[in-house]
Image (cartoon, rainbow, N blue to C red):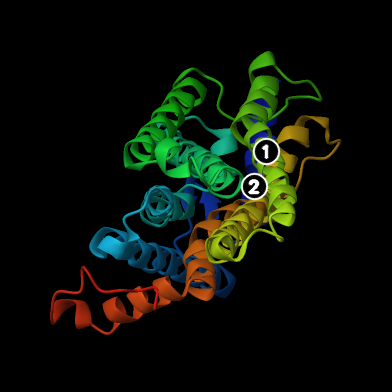
Amino acid sequence: MQQDSIINGTNAFIASHPCYESNNTSLIFTSTPSLICISVYCVLGLLSVATICGNLLVIISVVYFKQLHTPTNYLILSLSVADLLVGVLVFPSSMAFTVTSCLYREDLACKIRDSFDIVLCTTSILNLCCISIDRYYAVCQPLTYKSKINHQVALMMIGVCWGISALIAIGIIFGGFSQGTCNGGTCSVDIVLAHTMGPVFGFYLPAVIMSCIYLKIFFVAQRQVNRIQSMKCLTKMERKATKTLAIVMGVFLICMTPYFFSVVFQPLFHRPPSVAVIETLNWLTLSNSMLNPFIYAFFYNWFRSAFKIIITGRIFLGDFTNMGLFG
């Protein structure tokens, strides 16, 4: 029964995917790709390049310009590193081994693809959690912010984010809890755990925590409107930074929630989502890694200034490390 289900699922995948065919033993990329297949992969390739270039600009900006060496920007740097690795590792591996094809096989290539995906996705959301904590102290407890959130604390947060993400990936992938499909209308314990526990603890719980923190920040910021004039500039700057990073979190949730919703409830569907739906939602989650640099460039004038210096090549013509970017 299980083998029949895998074969049926594989056949359904092949029938609905424009880029794959079967050689009776495994799924392979078609030797005669259609125009649709070529177009899809050209678009995905451009997304990968845009993701790499955009996040590389953020990384160079934070590392090079000393004015950007702040705890908040270190957390943004960690997020950008995760997004850059999505463009370098997850995009190509997901193009070679799609998420739906890996549902029906458990070879090493799929384990590697899933490991990259889980580690970097979890790292991104944990970094966003740390950023929300940073914004909480910056807005709600400004007098103690610098003593509680300093460079050492930010680096410790980053280490914890990457360490926890690696442990989660090892537990899910190599512990045998990777995603699978339900057979004959029933689901094994492993599949139920993979479709519920992972997304709940790796996505939904952190998302709820972040949302609560930003709601708290919003209400506190509203009460700060009537502060004394000497504090208004600082409050305005922190509120703008908080608003921008809240938008980053919001875009992240918009991109990620549909896919994780489908993952959690897939065992309950009478008819599982089609290949087109699963692949579209998967690529929507990955596209979030491309969007963050554009958000920074749109809302932060100092990032725009840094980007211009890097893109125009002026960074190679002199020492701009101490240049003022906030003017």
CB under 8 Å between discs 1 and 2: yes
Describe the element under mark 1 as helix, strand or loop. helix
What is the x, y in percent for residue 207? 66, 40
Question: Would residue 254 be visible to someone looking at this image?
Answer: yes
The part of the image, by quadrant, that contains residue 54 is bottom left
* Residue 218 falls left or right of residue 232: right
Q: Quadrant of the N terminus?
A: top right
Query: In the rendered image of this protein, does residue 310 appear above or below residue 121?
Result: below
Name the amino acid, label 1.
Answer: Gly
* Residue 317 falls left or right of residue 89: left
What is the x, y in percent for residue 317? 13, 82
**Other residues around mark 1 within 10 Å, as few (<14) / some (14–19) / many (≥20):** some
Q: Which mark is residue 9?
A: 1
Q: Nearer the viewer, residue 144 or 62?
A: 144
Name the amino acid, label 2.
Answer: Phe
In percent of the image, x 62 and y 40: which residue is there?
10
Residue denoted by label 2: 13
- Please give the count of numbered marks on the rendered protein: 2
What is the x, y in percent for residue 183? 73, 25
The part of the image, by quadrant, that contains residue 206 is top right
In percent of the image, x 47 and y 40: which residue is there?
123
Describe the element under mark 2 as helix, strand or loop. helix
Query: In the rendered image of this protein, does residue 22 appear above or below residue 194?
Result: below
